Image (cartoon, grey):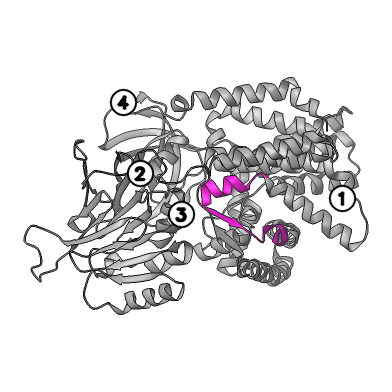
Amino acid sequence: MLLSYYRRPLFLLLLAYAGGIFIFRDRLLTPEPLPFALPRAGAIVEGRVAEYPVSVPGGVRFALETSAVYGQPARTGLMVYAKPGAFSYGDTVSMLADLEIPPGASVPGSLDWADFLARRGIAAQARAHDLDLVRQAGPALRLARRFRTSALGSFQAALPKEEAAVLGGVVLGEKKSVPPELKTAFQDSGAMHLLVASGSNVGFIVAVVYFLCARLGLGRRYSGLAALGLAGFYVVSAGLDAPLVRAYLMFSAGLAAWLLRRESGAFQALTAAALLILLLSPRSLFDAGFQMSFLAAYGLTVGLALWGKYLKSGGPAGKALGLLLVSFFAQLCLYPVLAVYFHKISLVSLLSNMALVPASGVAMALGFALALSGGFIFKALAWAAGIFMAAFLGAVRFFAGLPFASVSVPEPSAWFVGGFFILALALLHAPLLGFRKRRLYLAAGLGLGVASLGQVGGPRGDGPLKYKAQLFGDSDTACVLVSAPGGLYLVNPGVNGQKLADSALTAGHTSLAGVLLTSLEEKNFSGLEELARLVGVGSVLLPPGPRPVALARALGGLEKKGTAVRRLWPGERAETGELIAASWGGPQGYTGAGDLLDWEIGAVKISAGGLRAEKSAPCGAPAGAAEAESWKTVTLEFELPPGGCPE
């Protein structure tokens, strides 16, 4: 591979087209609206099921590409919740449905469901009451659906629930049934990508089919066509996910060139696959699966092409080094993306993937064999698959359980991401740039310099003091996340601790300067223990009164880690990076009847048990306030002059 590859017309066209998509992203990511305001009850909708339905509590969920609403042409997307029925991917259905606006992020930094659906072209949610099948999909798609259902049924019949769910992910990318705890283990071990059907699956199908056809005496051309045909059938069975489509297009281009005895590089095939997918679906550019698939494939393509001669050393040590470098190339460009989307980086992924990736290939072979077998052969394969999958999951849990297997990381700045990719490109192209050439070290230095720009400047500096209060929670708990010059503060950690940790990491912090409670009710601290396992907590400030048993246990664990725990009476103050003051809520002060503490965090006052945030130091500027709404995030932002308000 040469640097001139980046000047080829196809690659330049891809860059220009992707740049255009990014520039006009607001227009592209806005789904076609419905011809009426939402919510709307009893709408008559017809459309095509755009994905395989997945099980959710009370029924199934699937995306629908509408063709008509109230009998009038209307093309947009809906996320449909319905009872299970005789319909699936590709079928045309009609329904009577209640339409509503999708909810946003209930916790800052957590999944914004409305934004996620909008990026897929989905304008609303639909609760279907009466759903009828209008027209079935074509015979080829029905056959692919039948194979998928049969394969997943075979896994469930042959294996315990966990092993069957993981095998469904490895073979068909169906990971919805994998328990959350096991997904976390895969993530911590750096093996989450194994639960996504990807290029290795397509390569396995192509290689096996081509080999069998060649052994049967079919010629080069017919063996290749059969391999591509069955691989395409598999891609449809697995749901046409971006990693599979990317791999299939790359294999198609490569195999077609080979059959025609034409030279075709992997880089050119990767470029063509990306361009074709974006031409058909421009929104894919903003899809995490698309980004991660192409970044991993790019790292492998460039890394193996340029570092290949260094991977040919013999012996066990040489082979181990080769596997380690292959794992490094596949994951190098993924680290910033993992930080942005998941706020977690696996520190053992390079080692774990040396063992788990080859093992997943064996699991894949066993899965296909189970799906295609029957009788006593199926029973024998089920016994072997059970033993192997138990060992496979044991290995995943082993790597995930290692000390410091993964670390929580804050969301990186755009400067840091840009600098990281410059550095990654320098490392990938080091053999081409020349180890003794100045340009290699200039490129690496440029990457480090750009990445450091995202870290320049302290929180206070000489500029204005910025405050931001985000009110959120559920029907029971009112939480507030306060970003202040002195750090990040959380009031009432009473919702899911993982989501609260994601809020802090999204705000760019790996620790909270302080956690404050407006009362000692369990609803206000139930997420504290899990939160403290994921991010640091500098101090905890409590109202006066006896501590409940669960709170005492959580605080005991925090104190062992060095967290300062302090009870603040009304009128007292504490300095925790920001000046904190406590007072009784309400004009009557303490009454002895379920009283709540109000907290002042610098220039932000939190009152009404976390339901209200307001500026406590307006400095002559208009006062601002925000009231919480259940299941919604409400934000108050303002600035104060440098040095704060004069007394």
Mark 2 burial class by Cα count in 10 Å: few <14, some 14-19, many 20+: some
Residue 157: x %, y % from top left? 60, 66
Circle 2 or circle 1, nearest the eye: 1
Q: Nearer the viewer, mark 3 or mark 2?
A: 2
The residue sitting at 26% across, 48% down in the picture is 603
Q: For mark 4, what is the residue?
A: 35
Label 2, label 4: how many angstroms apart (C-alpha)? 22 Å
Tag 2: residue type? Gly
Q: Earlier in the sequence, mark 3 or mark 1?
A: 3
Distance from the alpha carbon under mark 3 to that under mark 2: 22 Å
- Mark 2, secondary structure of its residue: loop
Q: Secondary structure at mark 3?
A: strand
Give the amino acid at mark 1.
Leu
Within 10 Å of the Cα at label 1, are there few (<14), some (14-19), or many (20+) other Cα atoms?
Answer: some
Please provide the residue range marked out in magenta.
Answer: 333-353
Helix, strand or loop: magenta stretch: helix
Read off the residue under disc 3: 55
Report which residue position mark 1 lands on. Answer: 311
| Residue position marked by numbered label 2 in the rendering | 104
Tell me, yes or no, whether the highlighted magenta stretch contains residue 191. Answer: no
